[in-house]
Every structure is written in C-alpha cells, then in structure tokens.
Image (spheres, rainbow, N blue to C red):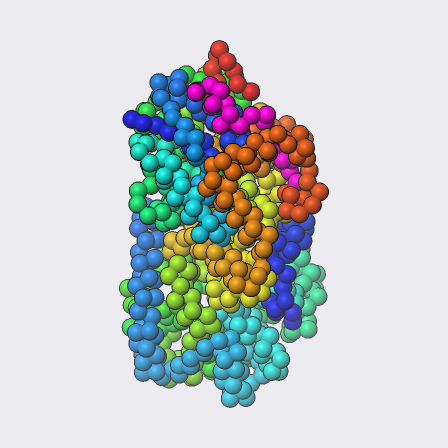
Amino acid sequence: MSGTYVGMPSFPDAAHRATRDKQLRANLTRATHTIRDKRARAVAELEDWEGLRQAGKAIKDETLAHLDDYLLQLEAKVTEAGGIVHWARDADEANRIVTELIRATGQTEVVKVKSMATQEIGLNEHLAAEGISAYETDLAELIVQLGDDLPSHILVPAIHKNRTEIRDIFNRAMGHWGRPAPEGLTDTPADLAEAARLHLREKFLRAKVAVSGANFMVAETGTLVVLESEGNGRMCLTLPETLISVVGIEKIVPTWRDLEVFLQLLPRSSTAERMNPYTTTWTGVRDGDGPKQFHLVLLDNGRTQTLADEVGRQALRCIRCSACLNVCPVYERAGGHAYGSAYPGPIGAILTPQLRGIATDLDRSLPYASSLCGACFEACPVAIDIPEVLVHLRAKVTEDAKEHGGHRLERTAMRAATYAMTHPAAYRTAEAAAVRARKLIPKKVPFGAGKAWTETRDLPELPPQTFRQWWKETHR
Amino acid sequence: MRIALFVTCVNDVAFPSTGIATVRLLERLGVEVAFPEAQTCCGQMQYNTGYPAEAAQPAAKFARDFAGYDAVVVPSGSCGAFIRDVHPKLVEGAVPPVYELTEYLLDVLGVEQVGAYFPHKVAYHPTCHSSRLLKVGDRPTRLLRAVEGLELVELPGAAECCGFGGTFSVKNPDVSAAMGADKVTHAVESGAEYLVAADNSCLMHIGGTARRSAAPLKTIHLAEILASTVEKVLA
C-alpha cells in the first residue's frame, strides 16, 4: 500500500498536475455538484437550520472550553462499563497501543470501520509494517485500498474515481485480498455493490478484531456513536470479539441530549439525507452481546496545541461532514490528494497545519490554498469561520518565515507597497510612473509571479490618466 | 451629510473610469462628493497575504483620511467588506462608516431607478466578498433591472468564485486560471455581451481570461452601467 503523506509536494505543485487531469476534473465536478445541490435542498427543508447551526457551534465551544473535565468523566464512565481507556499523545503512541492490543489477541487480521482518525495517524500502513492486515470495509475505502491509492474526500474517499475505473480495480485487486470479483462484472452500481458485499461478507464473518473511530463520544454515559450509510460499520462493531476505537479527544459531547443537534446537522450536511441509515452506539461491554473486549484510544496528536490557539481552535468544532469540500471551488479543481493529508479541502487547509505544524513546504502552502471566497464558512454546519483561520495561519507562516529568513522577496514587496500606501507623495509618484510606463507594460510577463499570472490571462492596459488626475482637472 | 469617495488603489490606477462613473452618478443624483486626496489603499492585500502588521498602517491612515465624513462610498465590495470587517481589529478608535455603492444608493439615498440607459445584454456576477461578506443581496440586480434598455440574463454558477482572490491568483495560478476559465465559459453560455460586477479586481481577472482566450465577452463595472445615460451611453 502506498498511503503515506510524507514528502508530498506543496499544494500549488500538486494542483498543477490535478488541474491538467481532465478525467479527474470531470469526476470531481460531477460528484461535488451533485452532493452540493442535494445538500442545499436537504438544508432548505429545515426552517431552523441557522438556529441548529448556532446550537452546534455553542455545544462544541462549551465542550472545548472544559475539555479536560469531560474527558475525565468519559474515562470514568467507559471504565465503569467495562471498557479500557488508553491515552495517546501522538500518532506513534496511538499506533503502538493499537498494535499491542491486536497482538494480545493473537490475530493478524482486523476489519476496519471507516475512520478519519486512523487515516490521520497512518494506522493501516503501520499495521502492515508489523505484519497485521487491516481490511477497510466502507465501500469507498475498500475501493481506495484495493486501488493502492489514497482517499481524496472525507465522506467519499473514492470521489476521484468513476464507475468504470472502480470495476477495473475490483477485477484487478479483489483476488489478491480475498474473494475475487465475480466473472463478467459490469460497471452498474448494483453489480459493483454486490461484488463488494460478497468480498466483504467473508471478512466480517472471519474477523475476531475490529478497529473503528467514532463520530461522537457521550461523556455522561461513556457511549461511542458511529453514523454510517452502508451497515458495514455495524457488522464490524457487533460481530468481532475485540473492538478497538481510536477517537480524537475533540469528538466528545457532554450529554445524549446534545446528540439531538448533531444527528440533524451531520447527515444533512454530509450525505444530504434527513437521517443517516445506520446509527450505532456502544457503551463498554456486556455478556452475550457484542464484543467481549472494548478499548478506547483517545488521540491528541496536535489537538491540545490547536486548542491553545484562540483563533484556530474553532477548527476542533469540525464534525467531518465534508460540506466545505463539496462547495469549495479550489477543492473541485485541485482534488483531495493535493492537500497531502487525511483532511482535504478547506477544513484540511486549516486543520492539517495546526495539527502537524508548519515545518514542511506542504504544510506552509495549505493556508494559501484558498481564494477566501467564503463558500466553506457559509456551508459549515458548526459555523467554523474557515477564511478567518486561513488568514490567521498565513500570518503565522509569514512570521515563521521572518524568523527563518524565508519569503524575502514577498516581505520586501509588501513593505514597499505599505510604504507607498502610507506616504501619499510616494504613492502618487509610483502611480504616475506606472501610467507613464503603461506602453512598456506587456500583457504577458515573461518571468516570476507575473509569468504565472499572464500565462492564461492578459494584464489590463493602464489608462493614460489616473482617477486622481481626472479629479484634479474636473473638480479643483 | 458629508460624503467622501474612496476610489480604491486598483480603480485609481487601472480602472479610473469606474471612479469617474461613480462621481458622475452620485452628482447626477444630487450628492456632493468629496475626494480626500491623501487617500491610498485599504491594506487588504497585505492582510490577506499574512502581513497584519503591514496592513495596520494603511488601515490607520484610512481612518485619518476619512475622519469627519458622515459616509464613505466605495465602488468595491471587497474593499468595503475589508474596511468594515477587519479595520476595527487593526485600528484603535473609530473607523469611518463605509457603504459599498449599491448599499449607499438603495439604503441611504433610497433610489432604485437612477435614470440609467444601457442598451445591452448583461449578466451579473455576484463577487464573493459582495455577496458573502457584505451581503449586498439583490441590491445590484434591483438596480440593473431598473436600467432602461438593459436585458439582464441568468449567469450559470453565478455564486461560484471567479478565482482571483488577490494574491491567490499569483500563489496558486493553475487553480485560479481553471476557475477563471469556467467563469468565462459560464458567462459566454449566458449569452451576455457584458459581464457586470461591483469589483474591478475580479473583473480584471475574468476580463483578462476572456481576452486571452478571445471569448466574446466584455467586462464592466456596475457603476459605469448606472452612470450611462441616453445622452451619453458609456462603453
């Protein structure tokens, strides 16, 4: 499996390739516009959508403000119910804990419920290196895994593939991982779903260990919640003997009552459904029902440091619905892989550089992967002001560059512009010079940033007179 | 009421016709417009590129240059939104009250019919900052519908960003260009001769894309359509 995000190119470089891939562009445009339109209709059905949105925001903010208390409450309740809680500071620690828990069962295979947290820490790759096979059971995750590919969307990880591409992947790869694709497989959705069903059924019935994430954790009872559409998650959560759930510490809600808000916000925002088809909840263990052992791995991995940032912490409200991806014009053109992490799109552009820091070119480029159009903020069901955080993180990137001697040209240009803008005489001189030299300014600039701009666009011709000059002639 | 025009730096140098149209339009409606000549720029470029300290200087200067006016009118949704939303975070003390042109016409002057004449087929592009930050809503289209001779046509995917985004167009040229190309395609599909918006920076990007691809599309600022009359048809 490939499946690593290390050493990815910076966003503009990755996007350069993606924007030239016609098939990818067509797949993405078609898929995002379909979900976008359906979602708009589902949201419009609710008269109190804005109220729900503000309630979701308020619950998450209150929870984050007292996160330590709620986490301790959750730990006590999970333990009381017969579960075992583990705390993981970072990806390495989480991967090590999960590996040891699986080893203790004597198994070398696990089934997985689609989970962003385990993608974030690269669990599958880690387990593979330790000789443990992790089988994804979500249909789209299965497609990505069989295709030796990376997910490119939070909700629809295989959004970048069309049906014919999926059929070819099934034909090529299913046999290496278990039951091969049926003879004469077509690319109709029903046929593809049946092939996946047959392939996966064997795994569900064989597996002794399952690994999941969770959409929510309820502090008052120690209950975990997964929302899904296919039922594969419920198979994983109920059939195996051991269940290991890896969950980010921000996924907590104080009470069951709070779920009322999120069980409305999440399905409508992500799948454009009034209610998701399967909601599974589990609390510890019980004799004769479900897994005999339950482990909860609580994952920090940069969340505490994100919480410390007053502007950036709102990213932790995210409920991973992917509405921001589906409305984002940049995501639509660049595709999910360009963001170089488990979290693509606008939320990824603010979450990833906060969780991972801004030490790499890729992570420094992410806050700039937006035209600040604001469609993401408008769509976000928990009202994360993504443009505000993007600009905040850009300031962190330039501040960091100042300390390390980077962005020299840009900083000089910004300072020069600022000088001209705050000294009217200098401003008028610069203006007059530009107007005088207007015949010399080419529509196409052969070097530097101007080259990139003018490869596809003409610069406007400067008029012979500025507004200021016209004003002087006519109004003084 | 003392009214000042903030023309914006882009309009001053590259699109003076927009500033001129704004003045002619307001004067035709009986408004006495002042132009504080010390004015320069709002600092949005620095702020959005990650230089808040550099943006604070022009922001403070803006507050000084326009202090004492009852209203500042700006023919740019983007600069208007920036001054209103961000200047209070950058500048201590009072920030002058800013109206984007269509807000001023409808909310302050209360005119929808400005006596304009523009005999062309036009599509309106609601720029992101006009619609999502300023929330100008249907003000521009109400003004356009009242223009004599003008045929307003539907723009497919109107609410989608054109891809300019200030320095975004320089830092992410490929994505920016792809977004611009789609915007031009949609505008051409609409059958409009002119694509109109209330932000010249977006129009510069869309117009530049149309010219390079030789698309049959002209771009024009809303103020110029509203200033156009039977006696003097602009464009």
Examine the image and state in which quarter residue B66 appears.
Answer: top left
User: A411 or A66: nearer the eye?
Assistant: A411
Residue at position x 31%, y 58% in the image: A58
The N terminus of chain A lies in quadrant = bottom right
Residue A5 visible in this rendered orientation of the protein? yes
Residue at position x 62%, y 39% in the image: B181
User: B98 or A50: nearer the eye?
Assistant: B98
Percent coordinates x, y for residue A274 in the rendering: 40, 53
Residue B123 visible in this rendered orientation of the protein? no
Magenta segment includes B58: no
Magenta segment includes A467: yes
User: B35 or B38: nearer the eye?
Assistant: B38
Image: B170 above or below A475 = below
Labels in figure, total: 0
Percent coordinates x, y for residue B41 in the rendering: 46, 39
Q: What span is colored magenta in the figure?
A: A454-476
Percent coordinates x, y for residue A368 in the rendering: 54, 53
The C terminus of chain A lies in quadrant = top left
Examine the image and state in which quarter residue A475 appears.
Answer: top left
* Residue A8 in the figure: left or right of residue A470: right
**Furthest residue to the front?**
A425
* Residue B220 in the figure: left or right of residue B85: right
Residue at position x 41%, y 70% in the image: A304
Residue at position x 68%, y 33% in the image: A440
**Furthest residue to the top?**
B231
Percent coordinates x, y for residue A382 in the rendering: 38, 56
Image: A55 above or below A292 = above
